[in-house]
Image (cartoon, grey):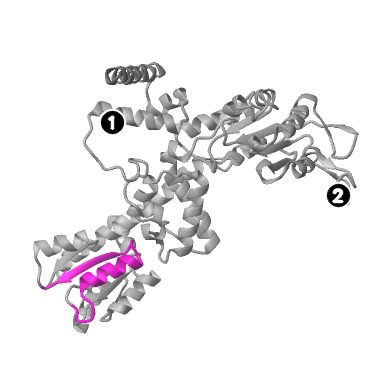
Amino acid sequence: MERAATGNARKNLSICVLDDDANQVELVTTRLEKAGFPAVGTTSPEEALQNVRLGTCRVVLADLKMPAMDGMQFLEKALQHDPGVYVVLITGFYSVDSAIGAIKKGAHDYLSKPLDFRRLEKTLDDIADLLSRRSEIRELEHKLFENHQFQGIIGKSPAMLDMLDLVKKVSRHYSNVLITGPTGAGKELVARALHQLSPVAKEQFAVCNCSAMVDTLLESQLFGHVRGSFTGATDTRPGLFEFANGGAVFLDEVGETSLAMQSKLLRVIENREIQRVGSPEVRSINVRLIAATNRDLRAEVLAGKFREDLFYRLSTIEIRVPGLSERREDIPLLVQYFLKKYSDAYGKPFQGLTRRAQIAMLQHEWPGNVRELANVISSAAITASTDFIDVTDLPESLQKSGRRGTMPVGEAWRPLPLDEVRGVHIQRVLEMCKGNRVRAAQMLGIGRTSLYRFLKRTNNRAAAARSGAA
């Protein structure tokens, strides 16, 4: 059973043998083919690189000393073309230092001449077994990935599971909902999920981006108009509220609407009726209103920019969509989803991301959230020339090492007492939460009382320092 498995794994491992000695090439390829490995040989480094570029080989056995291009140069170029290729260097001048140097530069192994074919077969079997296991893992990940999708929303983090649980509960009831969260977090997907799971899922779902239109156009879009009501109104048209009567209307970026428009929306909610622009006729409607915003509407109400009565009508139920920085454990799932999406779109069968590309993705702060991640994978899928996306295929902002935001730009590192480091971190989290202490305490993983106590201590110290200076 084990031999059969090994034989199948060997058949799937394509090998290119590169050496400036044609006799050595023939000897090694013949031995490999007898052992069950598909192998081709060449004395040309450029031909071997072409095989790497085309993906016709997963492993290259390369001689270290060659006149046209030495093995180390070949290793560097091969990894540039395909970071997932396995290069085994072979040399007649073996030393521990040179072996370590080669492996540090990306070589899988470093063997000496004359070749010990048992050792070589063991190395190749290890690679074949590794690739076979990775294939099995990808299949398992695909099955798990399907389990982590919910109405087109992808996530397994606690923050997302809590939000999805609330969506399931709310969707059963025909009520208005306010969806909040940062730009690009997926608020429209949540709105669609609410509708699809609702009792009126078969009815219309209409979408309106409130920030994309001036008031006159927005009013016409939502309420409709009659012929001649304004310049360009050549016919009578119903608005989205009539179109979606019995279903749901999604108002994206509702925080961008004017006070006058907010007054009209309030009438829709309270009286369930509308008037087309230019018409005195009142029409009854029955729609579910789902609104979304990336603004803090409570602050907008206090500033007089958003009607308090409308806010309370909309926020009977509020669903907050977490930003990507709050659910980093979902990044690999999202990468997998978008990689498959753009693989199919561009006809490129990607196997995944290189290790260093994965690290860069996890270290990025993602201010644009899921939308930014989708754009990054889309552009990388276009530019990547191998079946693995490498860090060099990513935007420059992701290529920089270290997590952005760990320290402000231009701030030199200096040793600090732990209390001061903790204080700096807490202040930064508070700034990110826009002063919301409850949310900051949740992100910090501490109780609200602990946070209040810390802030009180900090304020007392600052007051004491000021009075001492005075």
- Crowding near pointer 2: few (<14 within 10 Å), some, many (20+)? few
Side of 292 relative to 106 (left or right): right
**Residue 196 in sight in this render:** no
Toward which corner of the image does residue 203 lie, by quadrant?
top right
Q: Residue at x 22, y 62 (%)?
A: 105
Q: Could you tell me which secondary element the residue under label 2 belongs to?
A: loop
| 71 relative to 187, above or below | below
Question: Residue 12: horizontal and vertical position, in percent?
Answer: 35, 64
Side of 379 relative to 126 (left or right): right
**Residue 186 in sight in this render:** yes
The residue indicated by pointer 1 is 421
Question: Residue 98: horizontal and vertical position, in percent?
Answer: 13, 64
Side of 433 relative to 243 (left or right): left
Amino acid marked by disc 1: Val
The residue indicated by pointer 2 is 233
Range drawn in magenta = 66-92
Which quadrant is the N terminus positioned in?
bottom left
Amino acid marked by disc 2: Ala
Depth order, front residue of 39/211: 211
Depth order, front residue of 197/409: 409
Question: Residue 162: horizontal and vertical position, in percent?
Answer: 50, 29
Q: Could you tell me which secondary element the residue under label 1 belongs to?
A: helix
- Crowding near pointer 1: few (<14 within 10 Å), some, many (20+)? few
